[in-house]
Amino acid sequence: MKENKSLLKRFRENRLFWPLVALALILLADAIFAPGFFKIGILDGHLYGNLVDVFNNSAPLMLVAIGMTLVIATGGVDLSVGAVIAISAAMGAVLINPALGNRLISNEILTKDATNTPLGLIVLADLAAGTLCGLWNGFLVSRGKIQPMVATLILMVAGRGIAQLITNGQIMTIYYTPYFFFGNGFILGIPVAIYIVAFVYLIAWVLVRKTSIGLFIEAVGTNAKSTYYSGISEKNIKLFVYVFCGFCAAIAGLILSSYVHSADGNNNGLNYELDAILAVVIGGTLMRGGRFSLLSSVVGALIIWTFTITMYTFGVPANALLAGRAVLVLVVIILYSDYARRFMNRVFERKGSQHGTAN
Amino acid sequence: MTNPNDSLLIMKGISITFPGVNALQNVDFSLNRGEIHALMGENGAGKSTLIKILTGVEHPDSGSIEIDGKLVQVRSPQHSQEIGISTVYQDINLCTNISVAENIMLGHEPHRFGSIDQRKMNGFARHALSKLDIDIDVTQPLGNYSVAIQQMVAIARSLEIASAKILILDEPTSSLDVNEANQLFNVMRKLKGEGIGIIFITHFLDQVYQVSDRITVLRNGMLVGTFSTASLPRIELIAKMLGRTITELDQVSKAKVSGEKVDTQECMLEAEGLGRTGSLDGFDLKLHANEVVGIAGLLGSGRTEMANLLFGIDTPDKGSLKLKSKRVDRFSPLQSIENGIALCPEDRKDEGIVGDLTIRENIILALQARLGWFKFLSLQKQSEIAQQYIDLLGIATPSAEQLVKNLSGGNQQKVILARWLATNPQILILDEPTRGIDVGAKAEIQKLVLKLAEEGISCLFISSELEEVLRISHRVAVMRDHKKVAEYPGDVDDQTIIQTMAGNL
């Protein structure tokens, strides 16, 4: 075993290698077929352009993917994140102008650019709602010993109902401008959502890499029994990841409802659970749990949205988009298969050995 | 016996290299018709690699394989079966929830009118088993039978379906008791009489001498030699496997702390009527400082249940447990770690190692569990601890960042020991710490246990190998039928223990 592997080899063995290759391929396609994709301009003092859209649009997915990564690393899955996004969005919309009981409020009140609840409290309520959902999932999985897929399926189905109960079955439009800051605001020309992602990523990174939680998560995901025998509370680790995932989904809900100016129990965060799982898988974290990489999952989310916006740029109609995504999924799965890996390894190894003999 | 005309399999000059792993260099191996050939060597000597080459899992860089005088290249595991090579592994690859007959005939069921002909299938299966002198109800689910029977079923399947000429038995006896192993040996002898060549891999020396005709010894990927069993004394075999004269085991006996040194005043652990309904009857047990207490008993006699109760994996529902005369009321692994107890569990793969994590992470796991979520050891500190135990226990690895699953069994066991020693325990419970590991590592672990006892730790040593228990224990407790039935001083003779285990005393 050589201690100092070549830089190329070290990079190739890194978890980020394949996701970055995939991203580079999509961007290459853009560079060839739609050079305008990379144009970034400044409008009204902030950046605009396709690349900025990619980042702005993928922010909620990145957040959910961060939470989902931890859940998947313990060997679980959280199907309820889409529903939690809807609950969080509904919470925000309702609190802006709460209609106590069933009291009818005039349109004039509903549509005015004002709120009866302080913004801080609204944000707090959003996050609390999502975290509570995570707590529910976590209890079902860790204490109730229900399989994660089944346990979170409950909230996936019920959550959208809860969101509609909160908004009284209405699609609520939001007119309160300060609320739009999270989804549409800019700080120093860069979308606020990106700052939020960076902040949450930093929290998550510190939690998993600067405390022992990350090690415990990977241990639980690899071999829960050994981990229990080593004195680690597998239950509390599982509870933690679902709570954190709920928290991330709640922030995503806040950004999404702020971005679209409305709360719609049926459509907010639709299919986000599947996209988030896809992002994590693209990032190379295995569904059976164990080793994980937060950054790779974030890149995974970025890939999904770069692909989506690329499709739009190419003029692919929205209703054909899902078919396009199916191709993306297929390519990813083939790339990640053992067969493809062995093939790539052989190609690289051969080059490496030729290189070695040349020296 | 070594008549070359009788050769069934000849492997010549087999070499293979893997990065960082002991591979094979120019290894020859041959197997005759009607021969039981033991393949011996320490963990990592290259036994499994040789088998993998023979079964087509790995492809050699050079060398040739001849079967029945014909040169072959084994392309894949499937191909190896087609040319008559069958393997029965330690972990049986059969389905326990379907019937014996279905297991034997799986994929080759006889059909009638488009559906499976149950009667015919059962008949075939019975016939296949009767060749091995086994008469059982083949319509019962496989899981209803003992592991030994399951193994015979696997053998029957490989003979019947694959019509194997070469049978590889990889550690077949490691989970069998003496009677079951004997049953297996009878089957092996019968097959031998029919001209089948058997490659037998095991760590049990007794068994090698019991059944094998020849022994091939590998060491560090190289061939030490092939010997006729009758002409190779046991001590020489061990010396050849280790590559040195064997003084280790003698040293162990000498290192045993004399009984007087055990301080009977200081009681580290005291169980009174501790038990759990349905798993273990109430038992009394005392552990003193500097003392090694051995637990003898057959598989399933309640040994592991005792360890699990003491460590808090299971919660007792009767009796009491005192540690240094302080009563324990909360039972959980974490609580036990905080109380200074450590448990090396019986099932290394399932309950011990965390395969995808590195050696470093595996070693600090229990220590970190005690420190909690937020007192995270710095990477540097982790590496220091890991390196300290790698050196102390002689874990063979290129670095602490190697994944634990890539280590050999003995080294994995050392990593788990390191995990517990890092928590600085006062009471160490070892459940089968030497199972499935080679003689050298075994002696090292025994020595280590005695050294720890000398330093003041009290140790509960559970093992199926009576010899080992007697060699290092100051007292021996015997388990039978989920009960602690007797306790003897350490100089008791093995006959007494065996009689007690069997229920004759």
Image (cartoon, rainbow, N blue to C red):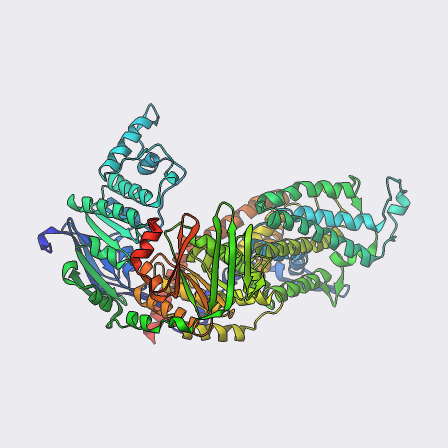
In the rendered view, does A318 fall on the left or right side of A231?
A: right
Where does the N terminus of chain B fall, quadrant-wise?
Answer: bottom left
Tell which of B56 and A306 is nearer to you: B56
Report the residue that reaches farthest toward the top.
Answer: B113
The x, y position of residue A70, in whole percent, is 59, 57
Give the residue at x 56% y 73%: B378
The x, y position of residue B227, in whole percent, is 16, 62
Is residue A268 visible in the rendered image? The answer is yes
Q: Quadrant of residue B397?
A: bottom left
Is residue A26 visible in the rendered image? The answer is no
Q: Tell me: residue A311, above or below residue A162.
A: below
The x, y position of residue B299, in whole percent, is 38, 51
Tell which of B325 and A354 is nearer to you: B325
Give the residue at x 53% y 75%: B381
In the rendered view, does A18 fall on the left or right side of A46?
A: left
The x, y position of residue A92, in whole percent, is 78, 51
Tell which of A89 and B263 is nearer to you: B263
Q: Quadrant of residue B129?
A: top left
Q: Tell me: residue A289, above or below residue B224.
A: above
In the rendered view, does A146 fall on the left or right side of B425?
A: right
Give the residue at x 77% y 63%: A44
Tell which of B61 and A330 is nearer to you: B61
Total marks shown come to: 0
